[in-house]
Image (spheres, rainbow, N blue to C red):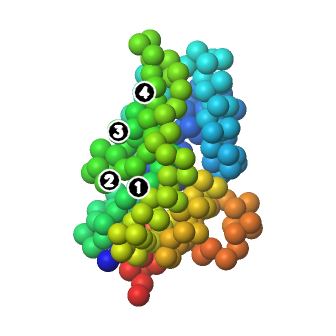
Amino acid sequence: MQIVCLDLEGVLIPEIWVAFAEKTQVEELKRTTRDEPDYQKLMDYRLNILDKHGFKLPQIQEVIETLEPLSGAIDFVSKLRESHELIILSDTFREFAMPLMRKLDFPTLFCHELQIAEDGKIQKVKIRLADHKRKSVQYFQKLNFEVLAAGDSYNDIGMLLTANRCTFFNPPDSITNEYPDIRVCKTYDDLYSFIVAK
């Protein structure tokens, strides 16, 4: 049996932090896992900037509510779920993801959570499990699943290299140059063909 593991941001939905950075015109918040391999370092950096500017969770959620899944993502997810088990493995947070997961008809999502103060300030991130993408793939394999994985960022590399078959989906050149042996899909049609190939 096969199970498909996909990253969320950059694969099915826009990069949430980039969208918030554009809305608020705070350029420093455009830094993502495509730029910074160390996720904890990236989140510490982001929380520091949010604190400096006084941004709170409701302001971020307001921007997220205006976002739509990437063009073609809704149909792709719907078609894929007809034939495969789908798990979204993301380093986003439940508090960020829910509006967009609703638009994708709630595929299963494994992600992290935030600790929020009463006034809406993000106090800290609650990482579900360090390196959870790679470890999830390993456990699915122990359950006798063949795992097919796709992602676009540094934080997907462990998941991709551990999966039985993997592909990048629209990654930046900097990552494909470092990992030239991982194939690249550019469209949802390409990605679907990769998944269903025998």
Foreground: disc 4 or disc 2: 2
Q: Which mark is residue 108?
A: 2
**Callout 2 touching callout 3 (CB < 8 Å):** no
Question: SS at mark 1?
Answer: strand
Residue extending farthest left: 82
Hey, what amino acid is under mark 3?
Pro
**Residue on which disc 4 sits:** 62
Hey, what amino acid is under mark 4?
Glu
Separation of marks 3 and 4 at Cα, in angstroms: 10 Å
Sequence-first tag of 3 and 1:
1
**Residue on which disc 3 sits:** 99
Q: Is residue 20 depicted above or below 162 in this figure? A: above
**Residue on which disc 1 sits:** 88
Residue extending farthest bottom: 198
Q: Look at 46% across and 78% down and name the residue there.
A: 194
Give the left or right position of residue 169, taking residue 13 as reference: right
Separation of marks 2 and 3 at Cα, in angstroms: 14 Å
Q: Look at 36% across and 74% down and name the residue there.
A: 144
Q: Nearer the viewer, residue 105 or 165?
A: 165
Separation of marks 3 and 1 at Cα, in angstroms: 15 Å
Give the left or right position of residue 178, taking residue 78 as reference: right
**Callout 1 touching callout 2 (CB < 8 Å):** yes
Sequence-first tag of 1 and 2:
1
